[in-house]
Image: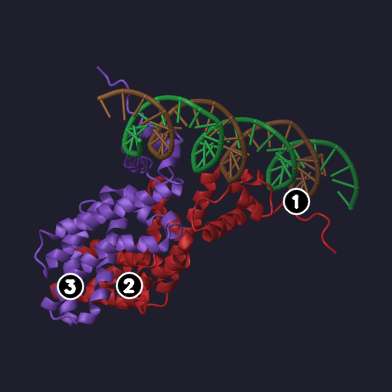
Chain colours: A purple, B red, C green, D brown
Amino acid sequence: MRPKHPAYHHGDLRNALILAAVELIEERGSADFAMIDAARRAGVSSAAPYRHFRDKTALMDAVLDFAFSELGRNIAAVMQTQPLGSAEAIIAIGKAYIRFMTQHREFYALMWGATGIRAVDQEVSDERSAVGFFILLDAVEHWCSENEIAEQDVLQLSIKLWSMAHGLAGITLYGHIERFLPQADVFSLLESSTHTFLEGLRKLR
Amino acid sequence: MRPKHPAYHHGDLRNALILAAVELIEERGSADFAMIDAARRAGVSSAAPYRHFRDKTALMDAVLDFAFSELGRNIAAVMQTQPLGSAEAIIAIGKAYIRFMTQHREFYALMWGATGIRAVDQEVSDERSAVGFFILLDAVEHWCSENEIAEQDVLQLSIKLWSMAHGLAGITLYGHIERFLPQADVFSLLESSTHTFLEGLRKLR
DNA sequence: TGTACATCAGTGAACGCGCGTTCACTGATGTAC
DNA sequence: TGTACATCAGTGAACGCGCGTTCACTGATGTAC
């Protein structure tokens, strides 16, 4: 026996819409989904979303928030299992970053895609994207003190390590690794890359 | 005295449209310019472009071609001035890459933006993007033989070096360097990054 | 050198679709008494 | 505990704009004779 009123009130439409948008972005491979499709996928009329989001960019913004917090969660989770101060901790963060970006190319496109360059409010996106970076900073700081690297280089080193992971993620997503190095996988590339880099640091210390 | 017929036939509309598209993408900061605006900017009616491009994606494709060939030209030009086999040659390529991407964020968005991930014909884009990479490969190969690094690592090393430059470019474009390291500039970051990496290679050799 | 004609790059108006957003409404929910 | 009413999350129809693309056309160009 089905319920008499099949949920006229949805209950959690806001989150359902965010999820629907994520799925659509994922399927289409780009961020320009149609509002009406997100509504339909959430089982709701085309006007309903406007009870929860002022307009489409507000929904997009919520999706971005979701993406960044997911990335932050992933990186934070990985750090629980790693000894602080080790190269492995740094590598694990990079791997988590790459894994997240390659498994969620729809988020990669959102966070780093063309639209992101200008459209998104800078202040807000700053705060969001920082969570993961501060975890990396912490790991690098501990590694530096264990390896007698000058304290003042921590920030710079973190940026460089972030760049390495970010660059590998992007190049993977565009198929360049598969194309030029079909037998390799990104994670071991990141691992050896990072080891080489840290080794260079110790030598030049 | 103005000419009686102010150029009913444009002469070089095809290229004018490509240039107009480039300008529009640059100004809007994203790749979704309007066909009619490109036409107007080229001083021509909205239907005229269709004499030269089957549809909008054909124009986009021509713009992409232009972008990739410009990147290739820039990298090739830089190599003329660098001693083959030196670390400086590798660094110069990376700098040219970053300079191109940061000075032409509109191209960055096109080549690496969200739309690029799926939309563009893979075969074609492969050929295009390869030019610069093969120049890098060559530089790395010479450096390796001068530094007694195993020949079979050349491809892998090139990918890693490309990733470093690409990552720094992306992170710069999104303002993260200005934000976390306001006193630094990308080019010196690339330089020290690359030196550290190559030093690590020599040590682990 | 001049003329006829094919060719082709343009025009301008209009079509049609996708899609964001609004509006007047209706059904469900929760609360005061 | 039951009833009246405010509140608010939904509906469905429609509007309107942006924009890619087409169509019948016209003006310029180049070439054969």
Q: Secondary structure at mark 1?
A: loop
Front-most of residues B62 and B169: B169
Could you tell whether C29 is left or right of A85 in the image?
Answer: right
Please determine if labels 3 and 2 lie on a single subunit. Answer: no
State the image coordinates of residue A178 (x, y, percent, origin top left). Answer: 27, 51
**Residue B15 location in percent, x, y?**
60, 56
Identify the residue under disc 3: A198
What whole-number distance in Å separates the C-alpha atoms at marks 1 and 3?
64 Å
Q: Label 3 crowding class (10 Å Cα cut-off): few <14, some 14-19, many 20+?
A: many
Q: Which SS class for mark 3? A: helix
The answer to whether residue C15 is above or below residue A146 is above
Task: Give the residue displayed 19% in from the left and 61% down from the top.
Answer: A93
Q: Amino acid at mark 1?
A: Tyr
Q: CA distance from mark 3 to mark 2?
A: 21 Å
Query: Does A156 appear above or below A117?
Result: below
The answer to whether one can see residue A23 in this image is yes
Q: Nearer the viewer, mark 1 or mark 2?
A: 2
How many numbered marks, from 0 up?
3
Q: Identify the amino acid type marked 2.
A: Phe
Q: What label sits on residue B8 in the rendered view?
A: 1
Q: Check disc 1: other Cα within 10 Å, few if <14, some if 14-19, many if 20+.
A: few
Query: Which dot, 1 or 3, sits closer to the camera?
Result: 3
* Label 1, label 2: how far apart the Cα atoms are: 54 Å
Q: Which mark is residue B180?
A: 2
